[in-house]
């Protein structure tokens, strides 16, 4: 090997190290940006789902009130006392509503964004950057 090629390689080494450091910084920035976008999308999706569930709950409550009224009227031949008919239908619909709320609450908990995963990834990236730079 001649002295000229060794000298050129030695001179290029700082430039290579500098480029690698710049690439690591760029990669870390892009990774953090991706994590931020993923987190924002997860939160947006969960917010939309929760809004639809609330709207559906209001519409369902109105529908159930009308069904309850119809059931109260339909029970007249068998149960002449109005308050007993209302109480029976109220208990039945309260139980149905409780079961529905429980099912959708489980779904929301299951589909909640994984904030811990995003936080772990961001911390790992920051540690890597600190160690490399």
Image (tube, rainbow, N blue to C red):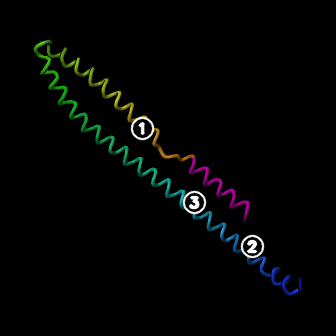
Q: Position of residue 45 (x, y in %)?
A: 41, 50
Give how far apart the Cα atoms at labels 3 and 1 are. 28 Å
Q: Is residue 32 above or below residue 60?
A: below
Helix, strand or loop status at disc 3:
helix
Label 3, on which residue?
Answer: 32
Helix, strand or loop status at disc 2:
helix
Q: Is residue 92 above or below residue 58?
A: above
Q: Quadrant of residue 4?
A: bottom right
- Taking the image as shown, residue 93 lies to the left or right of residue 42, namely left
Q: Which residue is at the front of the view, 83 or 89?
A: 89
Q: Which mark is residue 40?
A: none
Q: Which residues are drawn in magenta?
A: 117-133
Q: Are marks 2 and 3 in contact (CB under 8 Å)?
A: no
Label 1, on which residue?
Answer: 107
* Residues packed near mark 3 inside 10 Å, few (<14), some (14 to 19) or many (20 plus): some
Say which label, 2 or 3, has the lower sequence index. 2
Check the picture and name the quadrant holding the N terminus.
bottom right
Label 2, on which residue?
Answer: 17
Q: Position of residue 2 (x, y in %)?
A: 89, 85
**Residue, x 42% and y 47% (percent of image)?**
46
Helix, strand or loop status at disc 1:
helix
Q: Nearer the viewer, mark 2 or mark 3?
A: 2
Give how far apart the Cα atoms at labels 2 and 3 are. 23 Å
Say which label, 2 or 1, has the lower sequence index. 2
The residue sitting at the bottom extreme is: 4
* Residues packed near mark 1 inside 10 Å, few (<14), some (14 to 19) or many (20 plus): few
Residue 88 is one of the magenta-drawn residues: no
Check the picture and name the quadrant holding the C terminus.
bottom right
């Amino acid at each position: 090997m001649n002295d000229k090629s060794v000298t050129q390689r030695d001179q290029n080494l700082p430039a290579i190290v500098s480029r690698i450091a710049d690439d690591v910084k760029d990669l870390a920035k892009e990774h953090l940006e991706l994590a931020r976008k993923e987190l924002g999308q997860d939160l947006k999706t969960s917010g939309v789902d929760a809004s639809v569930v609330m709207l559906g709950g209001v519409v369902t409550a109105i529908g159930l009130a009308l069904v309850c009224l119809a059931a109260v009227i339909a029970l007249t031949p068998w149960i002449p006392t109005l308050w007993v008919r209302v109480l029976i239908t109220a208990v039945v619909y309260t139980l149905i509503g409780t079961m529905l709320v429980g099912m959708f609450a489980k779904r929301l908990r299951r589909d909640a964004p994984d904030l811990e995963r995003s936080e772990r990834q961001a911390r790992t990236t920051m540690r890597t950057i600190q160690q490399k730079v």
